[in-house]
Image (spheres, rainbow, N blue to C red):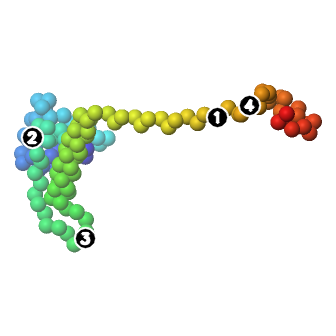
Amino acid sequence: MPTVTVNEAAKLVGRSRRGIYRDMASGRLSYKTDRDGHRRIDTSELERVHGALSLPVTPPSDSGTPQDGELVAEIRALREELAGLREEVRELRRLPAPETPAEPPQATLAPAPSHGTQHNFSDLIDAIRRGESSEG
């Protein structure tokens, strides 16, 4: 999840910076410190403590870049879709496992017709080398 500064966090939850600092000091709101020593708060942490985030809706710009309000609406739509997909997965897990298809019958070789004499492979090779027929 993206992180925000204390000023941005205060705007997102409709509180003062002092209130955000109080939440951090009491341990209610966790944060991280960046390389410059500035506090950064994860937006999911803000939602956990303060509920849904609210952004002032800004009119769309002509630049084609989505504005904050549009991004929040898109995130909400994606979360709803994700919740629906999770429910579908739960329902699919409740279904019985599919039956495994029966294995195709194994091809079996029919025994060679016997004419009174049974030959083995080496007898056939010897007969071929001698130029004889195996029929006989």
Name which of mark 2 and mark 4 comes first in the sequence.
2
Q: Which residue matches tag 1?
A: 109
Task: Tell me the amino acid under the disc marked 1.
Answer: Leu
Hey, which quadrant is residue 94 in on the image? Answer: top left
Q: Which residue matches tag 3?
A: 63
Measure the C-alpha gap from mark 3 to mark 1.
Answer: 74 Å
Q: Which residue matches tag 2?
A: 50
Q: 93 or 99: nearer the eye?
A: 99
> Which residue is outermost to the front?
116
Q: Residues within 10 Å of mark 3 (few under 14, many from 20)?
A: few
Name which of mark 2 and mark 1 comes first in the sequence.
2
Task: Tell me the amino acid under the disc marked 4.
Answer: Ser
Q: Is residue 52 above or below residue 23?
A: below
Q: Residues within 10 Å of mark 1 (few under 14, many from 20)?
A: few
Judged by depth in the image, the label closer to the viewer, 3 or 1, is 1
Q: Identify the residue at image location x=71%, y=34%.
A: 113
* Quadrant placement of the N terminus: top left
Label 2 element class: helix
Q: 63 or 15: nearer the eye?
A: 63
Measure the C-alpha gap from mark 2 to mark 3.
Answer: 32 Å
Q: Is residue 60 above or below residue 95?
A: below
